[in-house]
Image: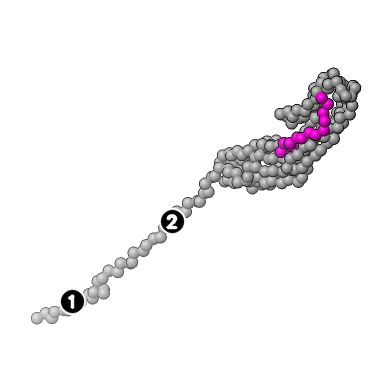
């Protein structure tokens, strides 16, 4: 009788298929460039400044924005100069002259690729009071007389007159700041007439003495 041959039975370890573990691929995130938003120019400096004629003055104009703005300006009071300092700023400096006394408006523009901005800078130039016009010319009894005395100063000075004017003459303060002495001297007003004019403002006071000679008989 045939002898049975044993059939080998494969072990579970031999029949199990080995599957390599799944791998997880890491994709780096997309990096987007960071861009700064443009900002139109804006002024950060004051819109007014005060100086006294004859004294050193310095004022910084500043503006911000992205990109940094460039500054431009209109005419300045005489004696002051503009210097661009970079980074959206400029310096107004110098010694203002008395002829610029008053309120001077300076138009300033800040401009960049993001836009433009405007500002009106008011520079207040103060000045001590003063008189101009020289000595008074002589008057004549019975003839019309007119003479103008110039004044300056800021704030606008107050004016006071003292002394005794010849009969027929009067002082008048005009809208442009000048003083006029006019009229017709009456008979009997001949001779010398001392007159004093005083100007005053917060920066000081000045008094000028005049002598008006009137040709003709005195009283």
Indicate the quadrant where residue 107 lies: top right
Per the image, the residue denoted by label 1 is: 7
Residue situated furthest front in the rendering: 219
Number of numbered discs overlaid on the protein picture:
2
Q: Residue at x 60, y 38 (%)?
A: 118
Label 2 residue SS: loop
- Residue nearer the viewer, 195 or 95: 195
Q: Looking at the image, which is closer to me, 20 or 112?
A: 112
Q: Is residue 102 left or right of residue 13?
A: right
Q: Position of residue 2 (x, y in %)?
A: 11, 79
Instruction: Nearest to the eye among marks 1 and 2: give it.
Output: 2
Is residue 188 visible in this depiction of the protein?
Answer: yes
Instruction: Give neighbour class at mark 1: few <14, some 14-19, many 20+ (Cα, 10 Å).
Output: few
Q: Which residues are magenta?
A: 153-167
* Above-or-below relation of 174 to 106: above
The answer to whether 179 is drawn above or below residue 187 in the figure is below
Residue at the image position 74 percent from the left and 40 percent from the top: 201
Observer-nearest of 118 and 144: 144
* Magenta stretch contains residue 166: yes
- Residue 24 x %, y %: 37, 62
Is 25 left or right of 36, judged from the image as shown?
left
Res. 29 mark: 2
The picture quadrant where one finds residue 160 is top right
Instruction: Kindly state the secondary structure of the residue where label 1 is placed.
Output: loop
Task: Kindly report the distance in space between the C-alpha atoms of the residues bearing marks 1 and 2.
Answer: 58 Å
Identified at 60% across, 46% down, the residue is 44
In percent of width and height, residue 95 lies at 76, 43
Left or right position of 37 against 194: left
Membership of 161 in magenta stretch: yes
Q: Position of residue 119 (x, y in %)?
A: 61, 39
């Amino acid at each position: 009788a045939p002898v049975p041959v044993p059939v080998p039975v494969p072990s579970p370890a031999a029949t199990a298929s080995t599957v390599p573990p799944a791998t997880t691929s890491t994709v780096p995130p997309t990096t987007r460039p960071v861009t700064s938003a443009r900002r139109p120019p804006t002024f950060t400096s004051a819109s007014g400044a005060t100086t006294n004629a004859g004294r050193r003055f310095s004022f910084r104009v500043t503006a911000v924005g992205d990109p940094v703005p460039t500054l431009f300006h209109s005419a300045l009071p005489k004696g002051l100069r503009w210097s661009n300092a970079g980074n959206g700023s400029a310096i107004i400096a110098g010694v203002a002259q008395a002829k610029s006394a008053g309120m001077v408006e300076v138009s300033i523009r800040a401009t960049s690729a993001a836009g433009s901005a405007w500002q009106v800078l008011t520079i207040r130039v103060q000045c001590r009071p003063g008189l101009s016009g020289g000595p008074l010319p002589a008057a004549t009894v019975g003839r019309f007389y007119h003479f103008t005395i110039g004044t300056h100063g800021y704030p606008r000075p107050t004016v006071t007159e003292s002394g005794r004017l010849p009969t027929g003459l009067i002082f008048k303060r005009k809208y442009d700041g000048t003083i006029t002495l006019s009229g017709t001297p009456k008979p009997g007003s001949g001779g010398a007439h001392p007159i004093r004019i005083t100007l005053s403002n917060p920066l000081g006071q000045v008094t000028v003495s005049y002598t008006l000679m009137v040709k003709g008989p005195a009283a």
